[in-house]
Amino acid sequence: MPAKKTPDATPDWNAVPRGFVRTYYQSVCLGCVFHTYTKQLGLSPRTAFAEARRYEPTAAELTSAHPVRPFFAAALSRCPYCDAAKRSHATFTTRRIEGGPATDATRRALVKSLPDNGGRFQVHEEKSTTTAVFFEWLDWLGRTLDLEGEDWLDTAAVRWLERRAPQEGWESAFAQIRAVRPSAQRDNGWEIAEGNLYLAPILYNEVLVVQYFVSRSHKAGGRTYQGRLTMIELMRRLRRVGYLQAIGADEHEQEDLLDKLIEHFTGGEAPVKLHYIVDRSDFLAKLKSVYSRYS
């Protein structure tokens, strides 16, 4: 028998493999919202409250890197539009889960477990492709890493391996090691020995490719565990170690090889569903507080 839902239950977000979940924080200025409804549209505060409470933001509004009024970056202490203080700000927490074999079962169970609490959670989905999702992921990863530092190579490796083999405990593994190396003795998987993490060749070379993609526009070439490489140098290495042959990339033209490599990483233009779970609890609480001041 499933556990009984309680209004204030906390969902187990860790149940879904981390590599397929993105979390966004977007703020909305309720001062701007009430001003629009009451001053520009002429609604009473009570009607404005009811309209605002019914509003369900779109995925674009909640995840945009360049939000528009009344939305703004969650880190700001004053509204960039009307200068309202933080007591008029509400934050939406949005988790986007990529659909697929690695997440579907746990995501369905998670949605079923969401507490019934007066519209606290909003759930909807959008369609995309595996190629678009992969490049969005690369862009996000590049923006979250300090490419001038030394630690980002390991972080990039962990983030890819979390997607490639989500059942493994990669954060724990990387916390125990000094270096990451390819293993000539393993056809798949990984092991820790003598303070090093040894990855099967295909995993190791995929990590190099991701590191290259993330950093290639930072400076000349891309930085990897094997040093800074140009595209030609990377392809030569992948051919020499047999990686290109292993993924069926027999083309000799540079552009064809790159296309084949991207197809291998993304699965091509296969359709994928993106599931958005929006926590509206802060919005609902702050909305009631701001309404009490207007009324």
Image (spheres, grey):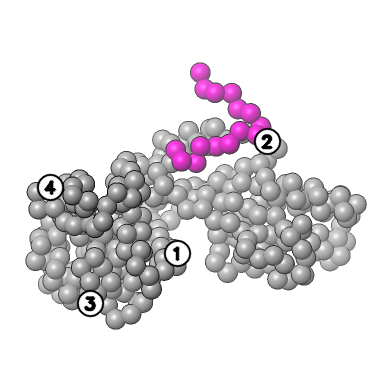
| Residue marked by disc 3 | 230
In the picture as drawn, the residue positioned furthest to the top comes out as: 1
**C-alpha separation, residue under disc 1 versus residue under disc 4:** 32 Å
| Residue marked by disc 2 | 117
Q: Earlier in the sequence, mark 3 or mark 4?
A: 4
Q: Earlier in the sequence, mark 3 or mark 1?
A: 1
Task: Place residue 258 in its image quadrant.
Answer: bottom left
**C-alpha separation, residue under disc 3 versus residue under disc 4:** 28 Å
The structure residue drawn at horizontal position 67% and vertical position 45%, both measured from the top left corner, is: 281
Q: Nearer the viewer, mark 1 or mark 2?
A: 1
Magenta stretch: give its range: 1-15
Q: Nearer the viewer, mark 3 or mark 4?
A: 4
Q: Residues within 10 Å of mark 4 (few under 14, many from 20)?
A: some
Q: Earlier in the sequence, mark 1 or mark 4?
A: 1
Q: Which mark is residue 144?
A: 1
Between 41 and 61, the one lying in front of the other is 61
**C-alpha separation, residue under disc 3 versus residue under disc 1:** 23 Å
What SS does tag 3 mark? loop
Q: Residues within 10 Å of mark 2 (few under 14, many from 20)?
A: few
Q: Amino acid at mark 4?
A: Arg
